[in-house]
Amino acid sequence: MSQKYRQDGYLGTSDRPKESRPSQPRPSREGPRSPRMPGFHEVRRCAMCGVQLAKSFSEIEFSSHCPKCGADLHSCKNCVFFNPAKRFECSEPIPERIAVKDVKNDCQYFEGRTAVEKITTSGSQRPEDARDAFENLFKK
């Protein structure tokens, strides 16, 4: 009698003898494989245009301006304590609300906001324009 269903799931364990597979030796490694994690770096960005500020802006002065859009950097939007969900939109106990958040002010609690970002690409591998990038895809 021929069996219609020959897959292992349809046969009982006693109906078919198990085939022994020859075990292949695994390649030995000298410890665990190290992950290829991207690096991280701390950056300051303008709250208005998002441009990365240079290292010279490590401490934001009262009269600092963004090099790209010219916005004031000593403002509520660039502060660590800016929080729209809090009273007067600030996490610190300020006595009165500052109405315009993107204009410079003389708040005593101001600290510049920094962000930790992944380093995704190196600047040397970025092509000059889109046409060069497209042609680089098909080079041999």
Image (cartoon, rainbow, N blue to C red):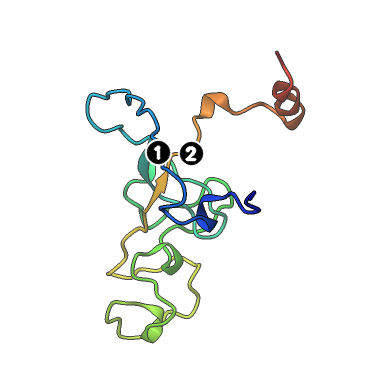
For the point 70% across and 25% down, the residue is 137
In terms of depth relative to the viewer, which is nearer, 30 or 96?
30
In terms of depth relative to the viewer, which is nearer, 123 or 105?
123
In terms of depth relative to the viewer, which is nearer, 54 or 123?
123
Give the secondary structure at mark 2. loop
For the point 46% across and 57% down, the residue is 12
Q: Which residue type carries mark 2?
A: Thr
Give the secondary structure at mark 1. loop
Crowd tier of the residue under label 1, counting other residues whose Cα lies within 10 Å: few below 14, some 14–19, many 20 or above: few
For the point 32% across and 24% down, the residue is 25
For the residues labelled 1 and 2, say whether their Cβ atoms are less than 8 Å apart.
yes
Q: Which residue type carries mark 1?
A: Pro
In terms of depth relative to the viewer, which is nearer, 116 or 46?
116
On screen, residue 93 above or below 140: below
Quadrant in the picture for residue 56: top left
From the image, tell me which residue sits under label 2.
120
Q: How many marks?
A: 2
> Looking at the image, which residue sits at the far left?
31
From the image, tell me which residue sits under label 1.
38
Q: Earlier in the sequence, mark 1 or mark 2?
A: 1
Label 1 and label 2: CA atoms lie apart by 7 Å
